Amino acid sequence: MTHLLHLDASARPGLAGKDEHGSYSRNLSQRFVSQWLARRPQDSVTYRDIGQNPPSFVSHDWIASAFTPDERREPWMLEALAESDTLVDELVAADVLVIGTPLYNFGMPAALKAWIDQVVRLNRTVGMDASNPLDPYVPMLADRERHAVILTARGGVGFNPGEAMAHMNHLEPNLATALGFIGITRIHQIAIEGQEIGGELLANSVAEALHRVDALVDALQATVGAARLKGRPQTESAPA
């Protein structure tokens, strides 16, 4: 069984095309998860709407607690890290991380940055190797194959790699860097562009993105299935 962790980061609670001022990124993430479960109903999903229920910002107490060895943590430190522990546990359990997020002012929404700050954590998702001072960081989520699907919506156009506005896109590159730092390096990206322009340009972008989402579901399910079969003991037979 494959487990998905589904995050929505848009401040808009509704769905574009259905609700007034609805979210296009939520449309994409919902499409991905619904298509996945339609084809693999035995799989499971944990859902977090961080756009409507943002994680806490990192505080002084959080930092003091996170950088205190486990055996020396006081009760208040455990409390300060309780939310982070829950979010990290959810991420560690996931085989596929699905993030639906808009591009806000050339970067990620504050709620998504808060989530990143809660899950990139010493001795939970990244370790330290003191014997290698030039590159001491050890990604702890590289222990098995995990995928991240980043589904974004943008007001403007030309933010894809190699395009005119690519240098101003600090959303997907930032996410890919943070996730890669903890060991999630299989990154898949699909974006809708032209919300502020609308009309045929937006409609075509939405249609193309939805088509790509469906194709990605097919490809990832085949990849994840093959990886699971490869990892099975030799005595276990694959399904007929």
Image: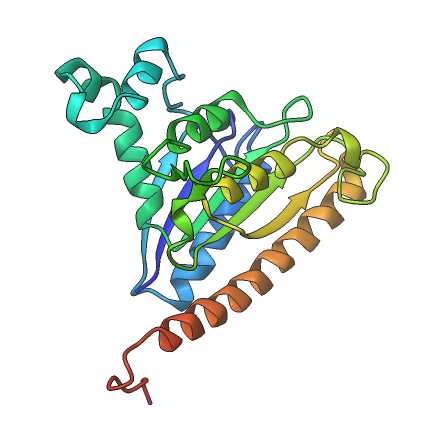
Asked whether, in this view, residue 59 is left or right of residue 206, the answer is: left
The one nearer the camera, 24 or 222, is: 222
- Residue at 13% x, 17% y is 75
Give the quadrant of residue 106. top right
Asked whether, in this view, residue 17 is left or right of residue 235, the answer is: right
Coloring scheme used: rainbow
List x then y, in percent, for residue 1: 30, 65
Query: Among all residues in the image, which is located at the extreme left?
Result: 75
List x then y, in percent, for residue 66: 31, 23
Query: Among all residues in the image, which is located at the extreme right?
Result: 164
- Residue at 17% x, 21% y is 72
* Count of numbered badges drawn on the protein: 0
Query: Among all residues in the image, which is located at the extreme top?
Result: 60
Residue 16 appears anywhere in the view:
no
- Residue at 70% x, 54% y is 208
Q: Quadrant of the C terminus?
A: bottom left
List x then y, in percent, for residue 98: 47, 47
The one nearer the camera, 137 or 49, is: 137
Position of residue 113 relative to residue 203, above or below, is above
The one nearer the camera, 181 or 148, is: 181
Residue 79 appears anywhere in the view:
yes
Query: Among all residues in the image, which is located at the extreme bottom?
Result: 240
Give the quadrant of residue 78. top left
List x then y, in percent, for residue 138: 43, 43
- Residue at 43% x, 55% y is 146
Asked whether, in this view, residue 195 is left or right of residue 122, the answer is: right
